[in-house]
Image (cartoon, rainbow, N blue to C red):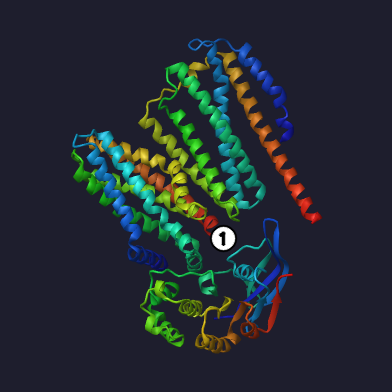
Amino acid sequence: MKHIARLIHIAMPVSIVLAFCYAPTAEVHGEAGRLLFFHVPLAWTATIGFLVAGALSIAFLLRGRDSHEITARFSAEIGLFFTVLATASGSIWSKLSWGSFWNWDPRQTSIIILMLIYLAYFSLNASLKGNEGRGKITSAYLIIAMASLPFLIAVFPRVFGSLHPHSGSLVADVPTRLTLIASLAAFTLLYLQILSIRQRIHHFEFSRQADDQKLQ
Amino acid sequence: MRKILRLIRKDLLVEFRERRSLFIVLSFAISTTLSSAIASAGTSLGAWERAILLWIIILFAGIIGLAHSFTREEERGTSLFLRLSSPPAFVFFSKLIFNICFFAVLEAVIVSAFVFFHEGDVPSPFIFITIILGGGFALSSGATVLSAIAAKSAMRGALFAVISFPVLLPVLIAAIRATALCFERHDISAASEMIFFLAFSGALISISYLIFPHIWNNE
Amino acid sequence: MLSISIHANNISKKYGNRIIFSSINFDASPSHPCAICGPNGSGKSTLLEILGGIRRPSSGSVRYTQNGENIENNYERFFGFVSPRLRFYDELTALETIQFVSGGADIMGKSVHLLEQFGLNQYRNLQIGHFSTGMLQRLKIITALILNPPVLLLDEPTSNLDETGKNTFFTLMQKIIPHKTIVIATNDPDEAALCSRRIVLGA
């Protein structure tokens, strides 16, 4: 995985160049519309982080391999980080488009709820410090949270109207669409790269601890 | 099956002989309802405002009341005894059933006080009660396993509130909407929310049942 | 009840980096009680809980066999457990506690019999919250025995007991040792003397 992730070094610069130079100026938003190429991938990676963490949690409860749980937690850390960025970039976009930083728009609200779930997950993790069952309990919570998300998404459209731009209208032309896909790919690689680095750091720390123990 | 009844009976005995937490929850419920009525000073609130207020009170009282289904076992040190007495599935279902019934009683008190003190009538009592009970059923279904999770942690009560809010939010929103619609006499749409409650409960109960042993058994 | 043996295979337990014990191997079978001895903090209670399946070992495994065949651990009917960590519900009475464990009227006679043996019958409708430590200990022993389980895991069973209580316990033990698989975690010489095998933990 880490070899594929290394492509980030090419992919990200390419995608940035595309975003600023190749894609045409957006009709409504002008140059500021280029934010799209960063905001959407951020939200996308935030969700990926969550889904990966959830899937790994299920795998952990089924198989019991510690590495699953650890990777799930790293994925959640990265996911949380991207969620914050997605919310921030989303608010800027919202200010540009509709005049206020916050609208009760389903997607905006969903991303905030996702952030709450992450924060709850990490609070739980912290308060279980020293408990042997920590991995299982936090995994269990993530799975429960994942189970309730579809209901959240289902309930929103009925309560709020949608201000969020319909995906069709903004990506009408080919260059914009291409740039967006490139950004999505770049940010996904970024996520994988950070995850793989994080895993390697953990691996080094772990083997260093094991070496220390052997010396004792 | 008899085993589950035995567990429920145990919980009932403990709950009612202990009394203190029961009183706290009920006092909280009544005083918040009363405060909200006084604060609105007799003016008639709209349907949505009433629905929101009602469900916020129900949710908060519920969080206080449901938290201790598992956290008290840990705090009193009886969880080992409970663990040894029955298989995990039975423990889970007994707590679930207990929570559902407890919550229904709690809702009865809150709703009665609310309707009594707040201006505004309840057009279709039958639908209204169904929604209240449906929402309560959904909330209890989610809260049971969350209580088991929070019980294992260091700051049980506070953590329970933190972890349950995101998970129970969909139910809260659906319940508020359904109640508001019911106040506004749109009965059919209100009643259709019941499907949502049942779906949520079904999903949460099934997943909780599968996950519960991983939480309950000491590692 | 048929006899059950416990087989511990290369058990070790560690918390974080601290190793409590390792490479524990032994078998417990009926009529040969085992004692787990060792200084405080050496992990006697932990090992006992691992044997009962209440705790997971860091490595190794525990098997249960009945007449040579492997069986699953089925907590309630399988073993009786006495431990300082066990706590009853303060709001229930002694009789209700026993009924909670045993489940019903068919055991009523036996409950009363055991209560009498341990001198608790006059307190059977008293709430646990009012019990003294000695009374609690006796009740713990009763609840461990009430379902007549084939295995008994006892962690310091005579702690907090007075002379009478201890006598009742030892007399009872002599009667049931031939029929049950018993493991006792203890530092008490009288309790250890009941056992034919001994494991010593700790440096």
Q: Position of residue A40 (x, y in %)?
A: 54, 24
Q: Chain of mark 1?
A: B
The residue most toward the right is A215
Q: Where is B167 relative to A30, above or below?
A: below
In this rendering, position of residue A34 left or right of residue C118: right
Numbered disc total: 1
Quarter assignment of residue A155: top left
The residue where tag 1 is placed is B218
Q: For mark 1, give the secondary structure.
A: loop
Q: Residue at x 70, y 76 (%)?
A: C199
Q: Where is the N terminus of chain A found, in terms of image quarters?
A: top right
Q: Amino acid at mark 1?
A: Asn
Q: Residue at x 29, y 42 (%)?
A: B54
Q: Residue at x 69, y 76 (%)?
A: C27
In this rendering, position of residue C186 left or right of residue B86: right
Q: Where is the C terminus of chain A found, in terms of image quarters?
A: bottom right
Residue A43 shows up from this direction: no
In this rendering, position of residue B22 left or right of residue C142: left
The one nearer the camera, A95 or C84, is C84
Q: Position of residue C202 (x, y in %)?
A: 71, 70
Q: Position of residue A193 (x, y in %)?
A: 68, 32
Q: Position of residue B216 (x, y in %)?
A: 52, 58
Q: Residue at x 22, y 35 (%)?
A: B185
Q: Where is C19 relative to A39, above or below?
A: below
